[in-house]
Image (spheres, rainbow, N blue to C red):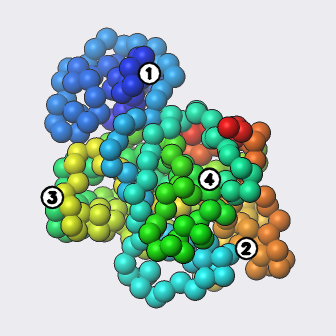
Amino acid sequence: MKLASLDDGTPQGRLVVVSGDTCRPVACGSMMAWLEGGRDALGPPEPLTRLLAPLPRSHTFLDGSAYVNHVDLVRRARGVDMPPRFWTDPLMYQGCAVFAPHDAALSGDPAWGMDMEAEVAVMTGEVPRGAGPDEAAAAIRLIMLINDVSLRTLIPDELSKGFGFVQSKPPSTCSPFAVTPDALSGWDGRKLHGTMCVDLNGVPFGRARAGEDMTFDFGTLIAHAAKTRPLPAGTVIGSGTVSNRAADGGPGAPVALGGAGYSCIAEQRTVETILHVAPQTPFLTPGDQVDIWMTDADGTDLFGRISQRVTAI
């Protein structure tokens, strides 16, 4: 089943089931209620109009670091060593995921280093405190994509304080559709196997394989989040930036050179620094166009497209 939130003039929008070019409102009214089991009758078909984020007012968004290759590359770019425990214990921060799929990416000071990060995300039902990975994975109700925007040059100063992200992580953007696990052929219960497609200004930038090089699966990420707290229905858990290593274990190559490319600019800049001493690709600036979507093995678009133009505030 494919779900979305229809802009009906209210802050929450209205939950709809999507099929082809039509949508049918769900009587329970909100995705939160749907997650909690209120799957009532569908209304008559309506035209598919502009959509909000699938869960426009999630009160809990926790973003993980499932692809440790990404963490390694970004830390290299900052000249910071990666502790060995990062391969066994996931990083996670609490952010916000509220932007609709076609909202502008709002750019402030160009010196902040705005970057996209293409991620897979899941929405859960209720997860009890202390749940293990199997119980946590069983709580997954919906899957979608996230553009987890980062302000790269603000990150080092924030992290140096030892207290995590705030200013360097503005609101993230959600894909148009959230899909139930049973409707995704590439879902294995813990990971999603598909190609994360990223275009920058109409040029292929990333074609990473989301099911590969994922050090921590979603069951592990959710259990990590629930270690000391219960998670309410509607919690969004992000995978972190999808990232692939090369066949030799080193950094992957750009799409233009036959590689899988990257899901964020920071990784490409790190590889450019390794190869050419200094980065060559700039971070996002007003006027740039970012498109993010995912395809399955047959090339089918699974979640619709995040399509954002960077706009100066």
Q: Secondary structure at mark 3?
A: loop
**Between marks 2 and 4, how big is the CA–CA gap?**
17 Å
Foreground residue among 313 and 114 = 313
Marked residue nearer the N-terminal end (1 or 4): 1
The residue that disc 1 covers is: 7
The residue that disc 4 covers is: 116
**Residue under the point 59% across and 69% down:** 157
Marked residue nearer the N-terminal end (1 or 3): 1
Q: Amino acid at mark 1?
A: Asp
Q: Secondary structure at mark 2?
A: helix
Considering the image in quadrants, where does the N terminus appear?
A: top left
| Residue 287 position by quadrant | top right
**Between marks 2 and 1, how big is the CA–CA gap?**
41 Å
The residue that disc 2 covers is: 271
Q: Is residue 225 left or right of residue 19?
A: left
Q: Amino acid at mark 2?
A: Val
Q: Amino acid at mark 4?
A: Met
**Residue under the point 26% across and 36% down:** 32
Q: In the displayed structure, would residue 123 be above or below residue 221?
A: above
Q: Is residue 95 left or right of residue 264?
A: left
**Between marks 4 and 3, how big is the CA–CA gap?**
32 Å
Query: Mark 2 or mark 4: which is in front?
Result: 4
**Between marks 1 and 3, how big is the CA–CA gap?**
32 Å
Foreground residue among 157 and 263 = 157
* Residue 128 badge: 3
